[in-house]
Amino acid sequence: MELRRLRYYVAVAEELHFGRAARKLSVSQPALSQQIQLLEVEVGVELFLREKRRLLRKVELTEAGSFFLQEARKILQASNKAIEATRRIGLTQKEVKLGTYRMMIRSRILDILTVCSQRFPDIDLKIIEFPTHLAVQDALIEGQLDLGVSLLPLHSNQLDGIALKPGYLKVMLSTTHPLATENSLRVAQLRHEKWVDINRPIHTVYDDIERMCKKAGFSREGAIVQEVSSIELLSGLVSLGIGIAVVPTFFDASGIQGVVCKDLINDDGSPFTEVVINAAICYKLLNLTPTLQALANAFKSYT
Amino acid sequence: MELRRLRYYVAVAEELHFGRAARKLSVSQPALSQQIQLLEVEVGVELFLREKRRLLRKVELTEAGSFFLQEARKILQASNKAIEATRRIGLTQKEVKLGTYRMMIRSRILDILTVCSQRFPDIDLKIIEFPTHLAVQDALIEGQLDLGVSLLPLHSNQLDGIALKPGYLKVMLSTTHPLATENSLRVAQLRHEKWVDINRPIHTVYDDIERMCKKAGFSREGAIVQEVSSIELLSGLVSLGIGIAVVPTFFDASGIQGVVCKDLINDDGSPFTEVVINAAICYKLLNLTPTLQALANAFKSYT
DNA sequence: TCTATCCAATAAGTTTTTCTTATTACAAGA
DNA sequence: TCTTGTAATAAGAAAAACTTATTGGATAGA
């Protein structure tokens, strides 16, 4: 038997609904049905009342099923506890230095701190901020850091990393901007705008954006009225109506007063994915311990 | 975390030797090394003392490792107990009728009974013997049986089954036979022998064997001095020197006085696998419950 | 009673994970 | 130094799990 199946089983048994349980597990409904069937065969017993050709459409537990639910919960809990306790005993490294860069989104940093304190309570995570994502990579190579969040590509083969979900671009506008009523925007609709943006030296996709505009028949050259060093500052300028900006899709602007974000779309209405911002959790290969790897994995799945 | 990794871990931690543990688990050594590494990353801690570039080549547990071993044992035990107890509660069917055929090897039947009583102690397994493997299939269709062991192919699409390991042919000789000193035999070496065999109506590969002999330049026609109805009787005749016989490789003749078995090989020395005897655990699709499926799986992996 | 909707099961094909067979690298013993 | 034993690594094969699309049965509303 495998714990995956127990996790799936517990989800279905708690929801009593395959569709909902599947959503909760971020898995498709057929995958879930299959795994539950396999589990039933493994145990050799029907866990859900389904035999009656679903006369009542409700999913219900059999007697054996509800017993098994209790046991499954215990086993899952025991395995989590075992990992935690083992970690506590075996941690060689109590302090981990994680490098971030100025442009990095505050909410991501918060997420990371949260995950760490929950899943690795004995690790003391020190966040060290660098001016640019490249400075993070340098610091990793020089051994000043254990882990770093940076943008791809990595500029040394001493480094490696785990990619996070790729980010695309969205448009940030003042709520009073004429285009703020649109659902989504095509690049061409931005041709006569004033822009604000991040300082070129820190910028990883400046040229990509320029290329994107050229393709749509205009240029931002001369239309960029101000450059700043952080995305938070940028949103300030946008909210004041100084200009519009493009920001990564993973930047959450919902808490920021006076700005709205609009999806960028192609002419056919499909999402615009030509410009990609790839971030990763990276480390120096020589310094990679199981602990750091486990941490990196944990961050990956939560960001 | 997955239980597979825990099982692997316990094996290595008990053996303190990757190679031996791998053999015990019927898995290759690299697979085991990989899974253990993944487990270490998952837990975030080194479980084995390996970092020291193996100055002593011995595999040793870290402190965290031996704690984790205890926990892993507990979890595995709990999951086995959970399945057993759930089975006990949920079993809908206490009696299972399993059909076998006369030619079937006694030791296999014993294996099956053993597995059942160990893994499904609440099930009362009734063995019913039929004259031929075809009679087993008929009885399944008529609903007289829950499961059956039979030879492939299945003669109805109402039936399905799980194939067992394929069997090939080996030669059974009297210990006093001139060829009994050989290590292995080519078909052509048997051209002047007298034969005993199973009754044609029960025989599934009679024609295959005849074809095999023809290929080697002779025929058994006329050289078959007696036909019998069970493989045990057959070995009796062989031990008396009445003739030689071909039997399935999975037939264990080591307990039978006065006979030896020799592998059949091709001219190039490779094993002769042209004639295949395919057995399967089968069932009627309509009557298939999770319990029967679980039983069938259990038998499959033990035979 | 018909139609639309909801839901789990099934089917087919893809992706991910695990496993296998080399091969390597290192230590220890002859 | 050469051989042997052992675990780690690499690369490709096999198995397991997952995806989307479809089916079929059951309910609810027209």
Image (cartoon, coloured by chain):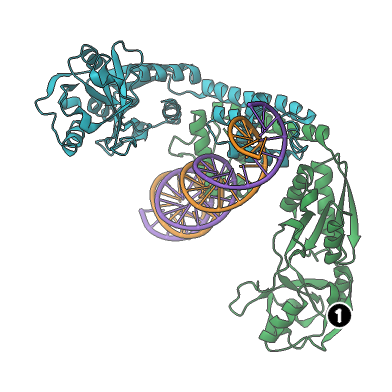
Chain colours: A green, B cyan, C purple, D orange
Residue B201 lies left or right of residue A67; in this view the side is left
Choose between B68 and A13: the one closer to the eye. Answer: B68
Residue plotted at (23% across, 25% down): B135
Residue A294 placed where, x, y %? 75, 45
Disc 1 marks which residue?
A241
Residue B235 lies left or right of residue A33; in this view the side is left
The answer to which quarter of the image holds residue B82 is top right
The C terminus of chain B: image quadrant: top left
Looking at the image, is B128 positioned above or below residue B6? above
Residue plotted at (26% across, 29% down): B137
Choose between A233 and B77: the one closer to the eye. Answer: B77
Looking at the image, is C28 positioned above or below residue A253? above
Residue plotted at (36% across, 31% down): B287
Q: Chain of mark 1?
A: A
Q: Can residue B1 be seen at all in this image of the molecule?
A: no
Choose between B128 and A182: the one closer to the eye. Answer: B128
Residue A132 placed where, x, y %? 86, 67
Q: Total number of numbered labels?
A: 1
Q: Can residue B149 be seen at all in this image of the molecule?
A: yes
Secondary structure of the residue carrying tag 1 is loop
Within 10 Å of disc 1 (Cα), the crowding (few <14, some 14-19, many 20+) is some
Residue plotted at (48% across, 28% down): A44
Residue D6 placed where, x, y %? 64, 32
